[in-house]
Image (cartoon, rainbow, N blue to C red):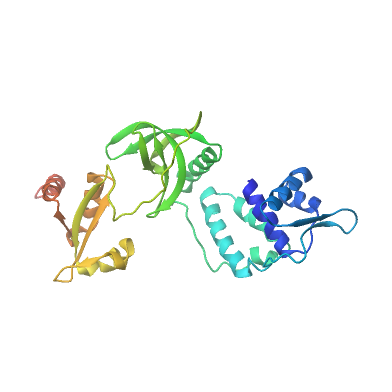
């Protein structure tokens, strides 16, 4: 919370000529001593602040210091608020809106303005993921590990990971971290976790690589395949992969090489396109997919 508070104090100082430590302490619900330490931190960061004692005194940015006091315009604040509200949609709280109220000084019109943009990042069953995301977020803030039972297409397993990022990607929430069982970095879906808890163990100090996930790139443990999609469903392919990422064959159909988390999930994904998709390569995937189709057909014998 300290970083949020420092940003909030600086935002208020950019919007107001002067503010007292008591006002800041009340707004951020901390002691005056904490506010004074924050002021020292901001000053050490290179922004000269002036503290005047007595009646009419307060904290302000030094006169003559070149600071753009409109660094956060009304439109900027609205954009920030939209993002913060999207996080509230996950947590089920008003925590981030309350933060925005604190840093918007006296201009409550910004916070209470029209909602032109609505971003809802919650799942259809909010209870299935909101509490888990809050717990994972707390574990990252406290530099702790988490443990859980995980359900994947390959089976169930007990996992312990060092969480480093909460990721909203491909229409789902994920936690990315170092899995002690696999001894590598992995992506996990909170909706597939049960028994999630924060452990007493601290994360190991590691040289954590930069998070980078792309449907079009291949990683260890994933499958890579080429699929042809009928041109009549181009709208869906553009929606899921982007217009700039797709290629066309001579007939105008779409051909894409991409990766998936595992083979069975990939097959089930292709099935969602029905007869509008065909696996081109690798050859063994075509055979295995045909076997899967055969097993499905057996459930619907002729005459029933």
In the picture as drawn, the residue positioned furthest to the left comes out as 302
Query: Could you tell whether 127 is left or right of 228 in the image?
Result: right
Q: Is residue 53 left or right of residue 197?
A: right
Q: Is residue 21 left or right of residue 145?
A: right
Q: Compared with residue 50, is residue 201 higher up or lower down, i.e. above or below?
A: above
**In the rendered image, is residue 192 in sight?**
yes
In the image, 111 versus 242, the foreground residue is: 242
* Tally of marks: 0
Name of the residue lying farthest toward the top: 200
| Horizontal arrangement in the rendering, residue 8 relative to residue 185 (left or right) | right
Where residue 269 sits in the image (x, y, percent)?
A: 25, 52
Please state the horizontal and vertical placement of residue 235, each as a whole percent of the image.
Answer: 29, 68
Q: Position of residue 251 (x, y in %)?
A: 14, 71
Residue at the outermost right position: 55
User: Residue 7 or 86: which is nearer the viewer?
Assistant: 7
Measured along the vertical axis of the image, is residue 66 above or below residue 121? below
Q: Residue 112: in sight, yes or no? A: no
Picture quadrant where residue 9 is located: bottom right
> What is the quadrant of residue 245 in the picture?
bottom left
Percent position of residue 33, x then y = 77, 43
Residue 287 position (above or below residue 49): above
Asked if 275 appears above or below 184 in the picture, the reply is below
Which residue lies at the image location 74% right of the left edge and 44% below the top edge? 34
């Amino acid at each position: 919370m300290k970083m949020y508070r420092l940003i909030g104090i600086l935002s208020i100082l950019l919007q107001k000529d002067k503010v007292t430590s008591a006002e800041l302490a009340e707004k951020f619900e901390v002691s005056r001593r904490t506010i004074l330490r924050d002021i020292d931190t901001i000053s050490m960061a290179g922004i000269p602040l002036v503290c005047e004692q007595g009646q009419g005194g307060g904290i302000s940015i030094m006169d003559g210091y070149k600071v753009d006091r409109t660094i956060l315009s009304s439109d900027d604040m609205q954009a920030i608020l939209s993002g913060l509200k999207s996080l509230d949609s996950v947590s089920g709280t008003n925590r981030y809106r309350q933060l925005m109220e604190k840093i918007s000084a006296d201009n409550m019109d910004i916070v209470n303005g029209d909602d032109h943009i609505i971003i809802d990042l919650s799942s259809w069953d909010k209870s299935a993921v909101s509490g888990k995301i809050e717990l994972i977020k707390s574990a990252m803030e406290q530099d702790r590990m988490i443990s859980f039972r995980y359900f994947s297409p390959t089976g169930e397993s007990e996992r312990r990971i060092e969480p480093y990022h909460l990721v909203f990607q491909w229409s789902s929430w994920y936690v990315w971290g170092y899995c002690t069982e696999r001894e590598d970095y992995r992506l996990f879906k909170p909706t597939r976790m049960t028994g999630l808890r924060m452990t007493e163990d601290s994360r190991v100090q590691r040289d954590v690589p930069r998070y980078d996930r792309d449907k079009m790139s291949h990683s260890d443990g994933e499958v890579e395949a080429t699929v042809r999609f009928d041109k009549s469903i181009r709208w869906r392919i553009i929606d899921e992969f982007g217009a700039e990422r797709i290629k066309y064959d001579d007939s105008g159909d779409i051909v894409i090489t991409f990766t998936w988390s595992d083979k069975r999930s990939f097959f089930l994904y292709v099935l969602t396109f029905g007869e509008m998709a065909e696996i081109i390569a690798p050859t063994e995937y075509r055979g295995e997919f045909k076997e899967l189709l055969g097993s499905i057909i057996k459930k619907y014998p002729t005459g029933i």
